[in-house]
Image (spheres, rainbow, N blue to C red):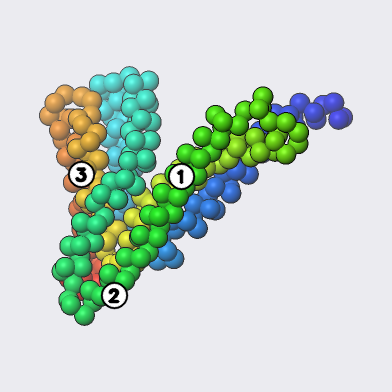
Amino acid sequence: MLLVLSPVLLLSSPLLVLYTLARSARHVARRLVGGGGLAPLHDPAVARVKTLRTWTAAVVSLAVLAAYGSATDHLDDRISEHWATLFLTPWLLIATGPVVFAVLIRWAPPPRRRAMRAALRVPLREFGRFIGVLAVIAALFTGFFVVTPDEVSGLPGLLVFAVVVLGIPWALMVILFASVAVARTGFGAAAVHPAAPAVLTSVLVWELAALGGLPGGPSPLAWLLLVGGPATVTAIAWWEVVRLRSRYGVRLRG
């Protein structure tokens, strides 16, 4: 029985280690950049429309694939686009967020501005944590090339090397989950203004579209897809802003 289970254990052990690292990384990422405990106000109707928009975009992509592209090319493009969007979003937020915050604070009545400026501590704190994770990754990669098995001796050295080897995928998972959280919360933008995440989303989609360039297919269709995607996201975002005002009394200038 033990002989039968041994290959199964050998094969499942790396998966178990990766699963454990992923759970730990996800937990740490949520604590680091989880929105400062303040999430955007949840509107079920807006959430349903966002889900419908996501599925519609997927169906349109499949239709374009069936008409003009190969499965391999489309899959490669989609994977590359997804990862590029994921890792570009935090940096675009870092560049765009201060402008959006400055406009929202400038629009607010004078009595509200001081509180909004004080709330900027939440995005700044989460940004600092995000940069800290990047510094940890850089340190681990440096340690991986400096501390090699040939240069360590004894149990302490091997333990250090094991920590470095396991720390690299763990830190990469942290930055992956942190990037997803940042894309959702905008470094805790809701702490400054409840409508800030929607405004940031509408700005970011156009920036990502400009950086991504034209998709595949005939030129008129490519331009329609390039403009249509960000336009629908922007429309939903601004509808969300309108509903924040009508349902919760949240105004962009309030």
Q: Callout 2: helix, strand or loop? A: helix
| Residue 142 higher or lower than 73, as above or below | below
Label 1, residues with CA under 10 Å away: few <14, some 14-19, many ≥20: few
User: Disc 2 marks which amino acid?
Assistant: Ala
| Residue 80 horizontal/vertical position (percent) | 36, 30
User: Disc 1 marks which amino acid?
Assistant: Ala
Residue with the mark numbered 3: 206
User: Disc 3 marks which amino acid?
Assistant: Trp
| Residue 249 horizontal/vertical position (percent) | 25, 75
Label 3, residues with CA under 10 Å away: few <14, some 14-19, many ≥20: some
Left or right of 224, for residue 198 = right
Left or right of 226, for residue 35 = right
Q: Residue furthest left?
A: 220
Q: Earlier in the sequence, mark 1 or mark 2?
A: 2
Q: Earlier in the sequence, mark 3 or mark 2?
A: 2
Label 2, residues with CA under 10 Å away: few <14, some 14-19, many ≥20: few
Residue with the mark numbered 1: 135
Left or right of 244, for residue 78 = right
Q: Nearer the viewer, residue 251 or 168?
A: 168
Q: Residue at x 20, y 56 (%)?
A: 99
